[in-house]
Image: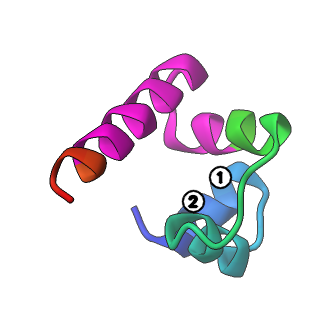
Amino acid sequence: MTQEQLGLEAELQRKYISLLELGEKAPSLETVLKVATGLRVDAGKLVELVCEEIQEQNLSV
Protein backbone atom coordinates (compact mmCIF):
# COMPACT_ATOMS: atom_id res chain seq x y z
CA MET A 1 0.00 0.00 0.00
CA THR A 2 1.36 3.42 -0.89
CA GLN A 3 1.34 6.41 1.41
CA GLU A 4 -1.19 7.99 -0.94
CA GLN A 5 -3.51 4.97 -0.67
CA LEU A 6 -3.17 4.85 3.12
CA GLY A 7 -3.86 8.56 3.34
CA LEU A 8 -7.06 8.12 1.38
CA GLU A 9 -8.17 5.10 3.41
CA ALA A 10 -7.29 6.75 6.75
CA GLU A 11 -8.54 10.22 5.74
CA LEU A 12 -5.09 11.70 6.40
CA GLN A 13 -2.73 13.74 4.23
CA ARG A 14 -0.06 11.73 2.38
CA LYS A 15 2.62 14.09 3.72
CA TYR A 16 1.47 13.38 7.28
CA ILE A 17 1.67 9.63 6.62
CA SER A 18 5.24 10.19 5.43
CA LEU A 19 6.13 12.12 8.58
CA LEU A 20 4.69 9.32 10.73
CA GLU A 21 6.66 6.72 8.80
CA LEU A 22 9.88 8.69 9.23
CA GLY A 23 9.25 9.10 12.95
CA GLU A 24 9.11 12.88 12.64
CA LYS A 25 5.58 13.08 14.05
CA ALA A 26 4.00 11.23 16.96
CA PRO A 27 0.39 10.27 16.24
CA SER A 28 -2.50 11.01 18.55
CA LEU A 29 -4.77 8.15 19.59
CA GLU A 30 -7.29 9.33 17.00
CA THR A 31 -4.60 9.12 14.30
CA VAL A 32 -3.57 5.62 15.41
CA LEU A 33 -7.19 4.54 15.08
CA LYS A 34 -7.45 6.12 11.62
CA VAL A 35 -4.24 4.47 10.43
CA ALA A 36 -5.33 1.10 11.79
CA THR A 37 -8.65 1.47 9.99
CA GLY A 38 -6.85 2.44 6.79
CA LEU A 39 -4.59 -0.59 7.07
CA ARG A 40 -7.54 -2.80 8.06
CA VAL A 41 -5.82 -4.03 11.21
CA ASP A 42 -6.79 -3.94 14.86
CA ALA A 43 -5.43 -0.78 16.54
CA GLY A 44 -4.03 -2.85 19.42
CA LYS A 45 -2.18 -5.08 16.98
CA LEU A 46 -0.78 -2.04 15.19
CA VAL A 47 0.57 -0.64 18.48
CA GLU A 48 1.99 -4.06 19.36
CA LEU A 49 3.82 -4.27 16.03
CA VAL A 50 5.27 -0.79 16.47
CA CYS A 51 6.46 -1.65 19.99
CA GLU A 52 8.15 -4.81 18.69
CA GLU A 53 9.88 -2.79 15.96
CA ILE A 54 11.16 -0.26 18.50
CA GLN A 55 12.48 -3.05 20.73
CA GLU A 56 14.28 -4.68 17.80
CA GLN A 57 15.89 -1.37 16.88
CA ASN A 58 17.03 -0.81 20.46
CA LEU A 59 18.56 -4.29 20.62
CA SER A 60 20.52 -3.80 17.42
CA VAL A 61 22.14 -0.55 18.61
How many callouts does the rendering have?
2
Q: Which of 17 and 55 is in front in this view?
A: 55
The residue drawn where x is 76% and y is 72% is: 13
Residue annotated with mark 2: 6
Q: What element carries label 1?
A: helix
Is label 2 in a helix, a strand or a loop? helix
CB of mark 1 within 8 Å of CB of mark 2? yes
Write down the region rendered in magenta.
Answer: 35-56
Badge 2 amino acid = Leu
Q: In this view, does 55 lie above or below 5?
A: above
The quarter in which the N terminus is drawn is bottom left
Q: Which mark is residue 54?
A: none
Residue sitting at 64 percent across and 73 percent down?
Answer: 24
Q: Does the magenta stretch include residue 54?
A: yes
- Vertical side of 31 occupied by 4: above or below: below
Q: Is 15 one of the magenta-colored residues?
A: no
Around disc 2, counting alpha carbons within 10 Å, would you say few (fewer than 14), some (14 to 19), or many (20 or more)?
Answer: many
Mark 1 residue type: Glu
Question: Which is more toward the observer, 36 or 50?
Answer: 50
Label placed on residue 9: 1
